[in-house]
Image (spheres, rainbow, N blue to C red):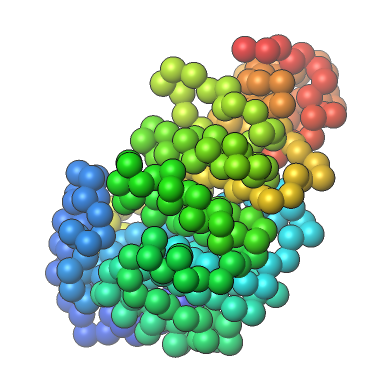
């Protein structure tokens, strides 16, 4: 799975940053990050072309990596799904559209929605520099997503990436209904991997299941989420940082881990499902312990080192992996 920015997207960003002071961009990026963490949305934080560029420099690599990881999980869970049309709702700089064309090469029509004019302008320039015909021809509509959804044609794949968090609570479920109404195949909703982000995902998941949607991933079932208390379902994707990215983030490490929560819901029940690894497996000299979400609820899978084949298999499991239920037969215990 590739999670680094496509070369033409990176080249487009590099071109846009020519002659721009990196220090000033880094300062803008820091201010934008602080504003987002305080609960402000893009309308309040991105008010100029320079703000949009700073946002893209600081956040685009991470949101692209998370979106690419989600779409890879979707492709693994539904390998026959080959969408031709895409709605990218709350598109921002076009992150989901770029990730989707890499994962789904048969896409032939893309429509993007966002109400932030500066992000739309930045996205338009980046799309125009793409080597992909479908990205260069993509239609980016400026306006409120709910209004634009009213007149949009249904698409095989609908993605709402890092968008639901900016929807007022009293409009959350009706927005979910609008996304679902415009989805002919699968809708994907991605949010930051925080307790608040997961609560939104969980609420929309339950609501759309009541509307006859079926979970494709990450959940292996359409039942109520088994997580309780302060626990929340989220995953992490590691990505490389460029020199400019490190400077924009004020970071020294050459990588970062983007945490995200998500759900993919389909109009058709998946043919197969797999248990999901919900945390980093804990390995000791004696055993490996893995937290799994299964159709039977949460399972703590414990395998002794003496069980060589099972132990060796579990050593390859990673946080977020889908694993076959037939492999979880030894040492399992319900939480």
Residue 331 falls in image quadrant: top right
Q: x, y (%) of residue 287?
A: 69, 17
Q: Residue at x 69, y 51 (%)?
A: 267
Residue 154 seen anywhere in this rendered image of the structure: yes
- Drawn side of residue 97 relative to residue 273, left or right: left
Q: Where the C terminus falls, by quadrant?
A: top right
Residue 12 falls in image quadrant: bottom left
Q: Nearer the viewer, residue 12 or 256?
A: 12
* Position of 130 relative to 241 (above/below): below
Q: x, y (%) of residue 123?
A: 38, 77
Q: Residue at x 42, y 34 (%)?
A: 199
* Position of 326 relative to 7 (above/below): above
Q: x, y (%) of residue 129?
A: 45, 87
Residue 4 seen anywhere in this rendered image of the structure: no
Q: Where the N terminus falls, by quadrant?
A: bottom right
Residue 2 falls in image quadrant: bottom right
Q: Residue at x 71, y 12 (%)?
A: 333
- Drawn side of residue 111 relative to residue 272, left or right: left
Q: Nearer the viewer, residue 147 or 124?
A: 147
Q: x, y (%) of residue 157?
A: 61, 62
- Drawn side of residue 335 relative to residue 112, left or right: right
Q: Residue at x 73, y 66 (%)?
A: 82
In this view, which residue lies farthest toward the front?
A: 150
- Drawn side of residue 305 relative to residue 11, left or right: right
């Amino acid at each position: 799975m590739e999670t680094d920015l496509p070369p033409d997207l990176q080249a487009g960003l590099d071109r846009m940053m020519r002659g721009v002071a990196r220090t000033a961009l880094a300062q803008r990026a820091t201010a934008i990050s602080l504003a987002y963490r305080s609960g402000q949305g893009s309308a309040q934080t991105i008010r100029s072309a320079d703000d949009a560029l700073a946002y893209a420099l600081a956040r685009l690599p991470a949101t692209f990596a998370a979106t690419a990881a989600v779409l890879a999980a979707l492709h693994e869970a539904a390998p026959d799904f080959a969408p031709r049309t895409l709605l990218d709702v709350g598109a921002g700089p076009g992150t989901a559209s770029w990730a989707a064309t890499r994962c789904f090469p048969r896409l032939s029509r893309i429509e993007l929605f966002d109400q932030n004019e500066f992000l739309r302008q930045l996205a338009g320039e980046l799309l125009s520099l793409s080597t992909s015909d479908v990205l260069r021809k993509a239609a980016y509509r400026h306006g409120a997503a709910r209004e634009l959804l009213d007149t949009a044609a249904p698409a095989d794949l609908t993605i709402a990436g890092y968008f639901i968090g900016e929807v007022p609570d009293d409009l959350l479920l009706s927005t979910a209904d609008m996304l679902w109404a415009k989805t002919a195949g699968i809708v994907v909703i991605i949010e930051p991997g925080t307790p608040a982000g997961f609560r939104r995902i969980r609420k929309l998941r339950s609501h759309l299941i009541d509307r006859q949607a079926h979970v494709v991933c990450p959940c292996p079932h359409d039942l109520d989420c088994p997580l309780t208390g302060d626990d929340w379902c989220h995953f992490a994707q590691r990505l490389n940082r460029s020199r400019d990215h490190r400077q924009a983030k004020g970071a020294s490490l050459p990588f970062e881990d983007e945490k995200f929560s998500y759900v993919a819901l389909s109009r058709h029940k998946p043919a197969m499902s797999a248990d999901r690894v919900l945390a980093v497996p804990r390995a000791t000299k004696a055993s490996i312990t893995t937290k799994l979400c299964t159709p039977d609820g949460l399972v703590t899978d414990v395998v002794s080192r003496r069980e060589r084949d099972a132990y060796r298999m579990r050593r390859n499991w990673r946080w977020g992996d889908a694993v076959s239920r037939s492999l979880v037969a030894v040492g399992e215990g319900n939480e």
